[in-house]
Image (tube, rainbow, N blue to C red):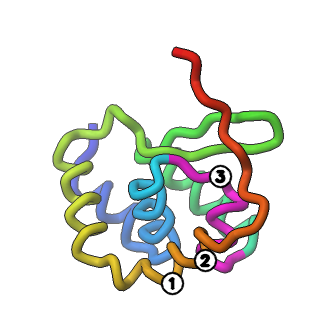
Amino acid sequence: MFTPPEVFKCLADETRARATLLIAHQGELCVCELMCALDDSQPKISRHLAQLRNSGLLLDRRQGQWVYYRLNPQLPAWVHDILQVTLLANADWLQHNAARLQSMDARPVREVACC
């Protein structure tokens, strides 16, 4: 069960908020993509992703050497709504991060799910 204090506490950190919104926008991102987009170190990004995963906001999956993160599809509708409204209302706030991600060389290639 997700309560507003739990969700807002997770998103109160700028790195976690930016990572979550980028993932909400892209659908799925790996640690290296978030390192590039946020211009931060692997340990810091991984620590924040672990907090988001432990809270239940994100799920991860391994594909070879990559670990990809996505929003938990079991999140209540109100959490998805908050993320989408925040994403749409704050495109300027994320513009630099999104541009860094789009210009990233050698982004990992995701395997297409068969089912």
User: Where does the N terminus fall, quadrant-wise?
Assistant: top left
Q: Position of residue 93 (x, y in %)?
A: 38, 83
> Does 37 lie within the magenta span?
yes
Residue found at x 36% / y 34%: 73
**Label 2 or label 3, whichever comes before in sequence order:** 3
Q: Which residue is mark 3?
A: 30
Stretch in magenta: 28-40
Q: Which residue is mark 1?
A: 96
Q: Which residue is mark 2?
A: 100
Residue found at x 75% / y 65%: 43
The Cα–Cα distance between marks 1 and 2, rounded to whole angstroms, is: 6 Å
* Residue 59 falls left or right of residue 46: left
* Residue 56 falls left or right of residue 83: right
Q: Main secondary structure of the magenta part?
A: helix
> Residue type at mark 3?
Cys
Between label 3 and label 1, give the one nearer the viewer.
1
Q: Position of residue 94 (x, y in %)?
A: 42, 78
Marks 1/2 in contact by CB < 8 Å: the verdict is: yes
**Label 3 or label 1, whichever comes before in sequence order:** 3
Quadrant housing residue 65: top right
> Residue type at mark 1?
His
Q: Residues within 10 Å of mark 2 (few under 14, many from 20)?
A: some
Residue found at x 61% / y 77%: 100
The Cα–Cα distance between marks 2 and 3, rounded to whole angstroms, is: 14 Å
113, above or below 38, in the image:
above
> Does 17 lie within the magenta span?
no
The image's mark for residue 48 is: none
User: SS at mark 3?
Assistant: strand
> Residue type at mark 2?
Arg
92, above or below 106, in the image:
below
